[in-house]
Image (spheres, rainbow, N blue to C red):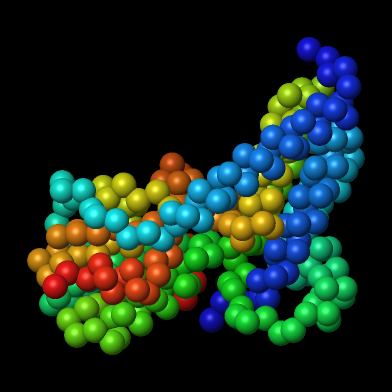
């Protein structure tokens, strides 16, 4: 198929791409970092998987990669909550070196944060850098 | 301690990249796309601050702004430049081979990524990194999480 009028075709492509990207960007911004309830069938995690002991009240497990812009903000937020809340610890896992765990937990992008209760059960999950107040509210009692 | 850069530099570069890629789509010019490909290659190899748009930012834009509120890691946007380069190379080859539709799709994908970065600060190239690694695992312990 020959493109008869490349200028018009290109312009239409540009308009469609910008509209679709804007819609996606707004959608992503609205849900990024939201802390949601975990599925009921999530596996238990323990010190063996995490490489660190569980927090007595909660463990904030952050999956990161080397090429992750929002991981730094997530790290600051989670470390802050762990530092000023008794029994809460922050564990950061390099996702690309723990691919088996990443696949088992169905983690598709970083940062992904799992909130574990004292027994290692995954109770909540956030994809994207979570907000401080949301993390505090997500801590198990 | 990884290299930290002014985050407004990559945003400015992404805005310029969007304009150049949109112009490449409208004109159907493989040459314009090739020029952007060279800019992507410079960003991936030298880092964004030493690539053409980064130098422009430092010369023309940065002096008119205040100091940045915070710095960000240099590695993610640099990785994204390499992803952009792949799309630009595919586009140039497709244009040269007469596969116009393939070329448009490649340039459109690169434009979407550049625009998302410019408008929302969202790094699509970085976001797909883990998905890519799930398909193609790296050798153990070649990279460390930037901290």
Q: Is residue A135 above or below residue A28?
A: below
- The residue under the point 81% across, 70% down is B57
Left/right placement of residue A88 relative to residue B104 reads: left
Left/right placement of residue A55 relative to residue A26 reads: left
Where the C terminus of chain A falls, by quadrant? bottom left
Can residue A38 be seen?
Answer: yes
Can residue B144 be seen?
Answer: no
- The residue under the point 85% across, 42% down is B23
- The residue under the point 62% across, 70% down is B74
Left/right placement of residue B69 relative to residue A91 reads: right
Q: Which residue is most to the top?
A: A1
Q: Is residue A135 above or below residue A20?
A: below
Q: Which image quarter: residue A127?
A: bottom left
Left/right placement of residue A37 relative to residue A133 reads: left
Give the image location of residue B124, x and y in percent: 58, 51
Where the N terminus of chain A falls, by quadrant? top right
- The residue under the point 22% across, 71% down is A139
Give the image location of residue A109, x and y in percent: 43, 53
């Amino acid at each position: 198929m020959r493109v008869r009028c490349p200028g018009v075709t290109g312009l239409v492509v540009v308009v469609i791409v910008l509209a679709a990207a804007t819609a996606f960007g707004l959608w992503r911004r609205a849900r990024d970092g939201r802390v949601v309830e975990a599925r009921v069938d999530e596996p238990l995690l323990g010190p063996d998987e995490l490489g660190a002991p569980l927090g007595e009240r909660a463990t904030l497990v952050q999956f990161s990669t080397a090429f992750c812009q929002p991981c730094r903000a997530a790290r600051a937020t989670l470390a802050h909550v762990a530092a000023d809340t008794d029994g809460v610890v922050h564990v950061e896992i390099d996702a690309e070196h723990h691919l088996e765990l990443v696949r088992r937990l169905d983690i598709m992008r970083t940062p992904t944060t799992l909130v574990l209760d004292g027994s290692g059960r995954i109770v909540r999950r956030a994809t994207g850098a979570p907000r401080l107040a949301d993390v505090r509210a997500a801590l198990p009692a | 301690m990884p290299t930290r850069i002014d985050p407004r530099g990559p945003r400015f570069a992404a805005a310029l990249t969007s304009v150049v890629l949109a112009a490449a789509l409208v004109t159907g010019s493989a040459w314009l796309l090739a020029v952007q490909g060279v800019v992507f290659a410079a960003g991936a190899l030298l880092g964004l601050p030493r690539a053409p748009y980064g130098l422009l930012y430092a010369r023309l834009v940065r002096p008119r702004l205040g100091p940045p509120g915070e710095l960000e890691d240099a590695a993610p946007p640099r990785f994204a430049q390499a992803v952009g380069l792949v799309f630009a190379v595919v586009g140039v080859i497709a244009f040269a081979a007469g596969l116009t539709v393939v070329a448009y799709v490649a340039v459109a994908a690169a434009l979407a990524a550049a625009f998302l970065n410019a408008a929302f600060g969202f790094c699509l190239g970085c976001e797909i990194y883990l998905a890519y690694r799930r398909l193609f695992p790296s050798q153990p312990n070649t990279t460390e999480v930037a901290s």
